[in-house]
Amino acid sequence: MKKLSKNNSEMAQKYVNILGINVLSTSIPGLLMGVRGNITYNKKFCITTPNPELVLASTKNAMLKQALNFSTFSVPDGVGLNYASRFLFGKNLKIIPGRKLFGKLIELANKKGWKVFLLGGEGDEAEKAAEKLKLNYKKVRIESFPGPIVDENAEPATEVDRRLEKDAIDKINKFDPHLLFVAMKNPKQEIWIHRNLKGLNVGGAMAVGGTFRYIAGLSKLPPKWMENMGLEWVWRLFNEPYRVGRILNAVIVFPWKVFLFKISKSTNLPIYK
């Protein structure tokens, strides 16, 4: 794991390793401080929000594993990672939902007068999300672009998509945003950011999954009590039953893999305090 800029070097030590993925434990204020510091020092950064499903997928996807461990801030999004950390190390992780972190970053961008670019989503999700954000945040400059359809390796699916990817990168680089948010579904978005970040004129990039849909009002948010109890997965299963296979991976296969991980590493579990 690479070292961060000097004003957030302490945060670089607060990681645990779950199934080979280094996962950060910090607070939202700590993350915002890290983002401000990296932008101040012109240090390009990447934010990913691994959940149990994504960590499990990384055990069979070398590109995803590399992308997650390349992240400057690998923020746990899913209560299952906290249970895993407590089981493996006796340490709690501070779970931060990705869409909540997105909202806090938009607030920070508005306060600082930063530029923000929304890339991806299905159909016109990015455009609709940008329109909603502009109504509430007057100081932040926001642009959006639907971008290409990409395959499981985060490569453009067709020649048309290849041109769309080039257009997207050109638009991003011309706009030169402080923050780039990418919604291509996981693991495509994480891999796409990892592959392209070096060539992007951005302060930092974050993979945001279905966040644009929530912001645009196309998906309903779970009740607060369910979010606070870590039961968002139940809400998503109720509203999106096609996710049943993915959710079973998170609530059944993932805990089993964590148990096997502890047995295999019982004498020398890697942890970063």
Image (tube, helix red, strand yellow):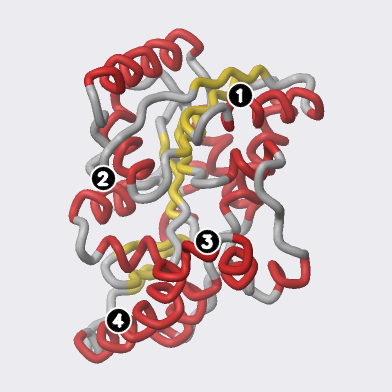
Along the polypeptide, which appears first: circle 1 or circle 3? 3
Seen as rendered, the residue at the extreme front is 242
Residue 248: give x, y in percent of width and height: 42, 76
Q: Does residue 273 show up?
A: no
Whichever of callouts 4 and 2 sits on the residue coming sooner in the sequence is 2
Quarter residue 226 falls in: bottom right
Mark 3: secondary structure:
loop
On-image quarter of the C terminus: bottom left
Q: Is residue 155 left or right of residue 220?
A: left
Circle 2 crowding by C-alpha within 10 Å: few under 14, some 14–19, many from 20: some
Of 115 and 171, nearer the camera is: 171
Q: Amino acid at mark 4?
A: Lys
Separation of marks 3 and 4 at Cα, in angstroms:
18 Å
Name the N-terminal-most of marks 3 and 2: 3
Q: Amino acid at mark 3?
A: Asp
Q: Which mark is residue 152?
A: 2
Q: Residue at x 48, y 28 (%)?
A: 119
Query: Viewer-proximal residue, 14 or 233?
Result: 233
Q: CA distance from mark 3 to mark 2?
A: 22 Å
Alpha carbon separation for disc pair 4 and 2: 23 Å
Q: Which mark is residue 77?
A: 3
Which residue lies under the disc numbered 1?
Answer: 127
Q: Secondary structure at mark 1?
A: helix
Q: Residue at x 26, y 45 (%)?
A: 152
Q: CA distance from mark 2 to mark 1?
A: 24 Å
- Which residue is disc 4 drawn over? 257
